[in-house]
Amino acid sequence: MENIVPLAKAIAIGVGAIGPAIGIGMIGSKAMEAIGRNPEASGKILVPMLIASAFAEAIAIYALVIAFSL
């Protein structure tokens, strides 16, 4: 039983980081696409992109907290 705990922690962090990693990648790619289409709107795109990235990163932090509590 003692040897399973590190494996459970690794799986919890790994699975919990897959979704936010994909989400942050999509947020960044779509923001760069939008800025490429309309460079004048970069100021209006940057702030919502950063906020959305922070929310996605918070999900990964939740997975890390759960892994530490195992």
Image (cartoon, rainbow, N blue to C red):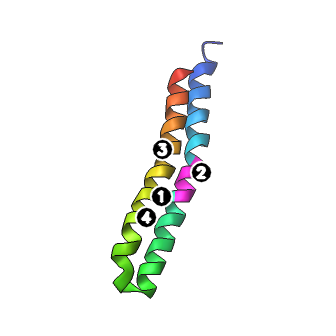
State whether residue 25 is above or below residue 35: above
Q: What label sits on residue 19 in the rendered view?
A: 2
19 and 7: which is toward the camera: 19
Q: Does the magenta stretch include residue 55?
A: no
Task: Specify start and end residues of the magenta stretch as a single range.
Answer: 18-23
- Which is nearer the N-term, disc 1 or disc 2? 2
Kindly give the residue lying farthest to the top in the view shown: 2
55 and 61: which is toward the camera: 55
- Which is nearer the N-term, disc 3 or disc 1? 1
Question: Are the residues flagged by discs 1 and 4 in contact, CB closer than 8 Å?
Answer: yes
- Which is nearer the N-term, disc 4 or disc 2? 2
Q: What label sits on residue 48 in the rendered view?
A: 4
Q: What label sits on residue 10 in the rendered view?
A: none
Give the residue at mark 3.
58
- Which is nearer the N-term, disc 4 or disc 3? 4
Provide the secondary structure element on which disc 2 rests: helix
Q: Is residue 22 magenta?
A: yes
Q: Distance between the residues labelled 1 and 2?
A: 13 Å
Residue at 43% x, 64% y: name it.
Answer: 48
Left or right, 70 with reference to 52: right
* Badge 1: residue crowd in 10 Å (few <14, some 14–19, many ≥20): some
Q: Where is residue 70 in the image (x, y as percent from the top left)?
A: 57, 21
The amino acid on which the numbered mark 1 sits, given as a three-letter code, is Ala
Residue at 43% x, 52% y: name it.
Answer: 54
Q: How far apart are marks 3 and 2 (CA)?
A: 11 Å
